[in-house]
């Protein structure tokens, strides 16, 4: 299966969900043009309150589209964009990527920085959803399924249907942690 973009989203406000778009433009070192989370320093409200000068490692939020299929099978009604992601993917196991992986997406390149640490607003979307996206697996490890974050290394336009090319960094590979 070829890895590709299922959908793209953006929002100029700090609403939880993002609107579907025909395309988004990624700006090098900044994020999604016109998105509330774009910037060289943190743009998430809770992180700005702690230290507004912190570098923005969360410029682009990606979620694997297969998650929406799984959630639907479990009775949730969640569509691409409703969890606040900018890019919904298909055919790439985002959680297996190490830190520093380069994703060529359309005309742009995103460098993976880490896992999204979801907030309790997820349960405002649908009760019980947070427990499905953050839980302990059978080995007692905390699993976070609310997507990954990245920074824009090369700007450009991204559209649904664009191919995603994965370029792993040289070893050693470091697993994703929350950013």
Image (spheres, rainbow, N blue to C red):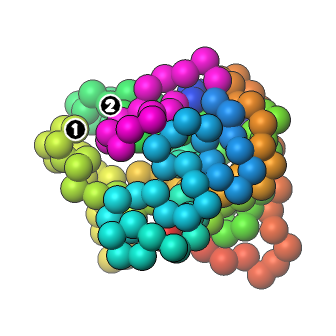
The magenta stretch is: 9-23
Dot 1 surroundings within 10 Å: few (below 14), some, or many (20 or more)?
some
Residue sitting nearer the eye, 156 or 170? 156
Judged left or right of residue 108, residue 114 is left
Q: Is residue 2 above or below residue 175?
A: above
- The residue lying at 58 percent from left, 54 percent from top is 39
Residue sitting nearer the eye, 20 or 90? 20
Asked if the stretch drawn in magenta spans residue 22, the answer is yes
Residue farthest toward the front in the current orientation of the protein: 53
Q: Where does the image place residue 135, in percent across and percent down from the top left?
A: 29, 63
In the rendering, which numbered label is found on residue 125?
1
Residues tagged 1 and 2 counted as in contact (Cβ below 8 A): yes
Q: Secondary structure at mark 2?
A: loop
Judged left or right of residue 73, residue 114 is right
Q: Main secondary structure of the magenta part?
A: loop
Quadrant hosting residue 27: top right
Asked if the stretch drawn in magenta spans residue 51, the answer is no
Residue sitting nearer the eye, 40 or 146? 40
- The residue lying at 22 percent from left, 38 percent from top is 125
């Amino acid at each position: 299966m070829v890895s590709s973009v299922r959908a793209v989203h953006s929002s100029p406000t700090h609403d939880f969900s993002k609107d579907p778009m025909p395309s988004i433009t990624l700006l090098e070192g900044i994020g999604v043009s016109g998105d509330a989370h774009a910037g060289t320093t943190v743009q998430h409200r809770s992180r700005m309150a702690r230290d507004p000068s912190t570098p923005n490692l969360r410029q682009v939020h990606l979620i694997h589209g297969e998650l929406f299929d799984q959630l639907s099978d479990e009775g949730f009604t969640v569509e691409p964009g409703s969890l606040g992601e900018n890019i919904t993917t298909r055919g790439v196991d985002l959680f297996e990527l190490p830190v520093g992986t380069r994703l060529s997406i359309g005309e742009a390149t995103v460098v993976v920085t880490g896992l999204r640490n979801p907030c309790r607003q997820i349960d405002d979307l649908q009760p019980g959803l947070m427990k499905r996206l953050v839980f302990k697996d059978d080995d007692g490890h905390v699993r976070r399924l609310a997507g990954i974050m990245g920074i824009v290394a090369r700007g450009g336009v991204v559209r649904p249907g664009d191919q995603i090319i994965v370029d792993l960094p040289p070893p050693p590979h470091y697993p994703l942690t929350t950013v």
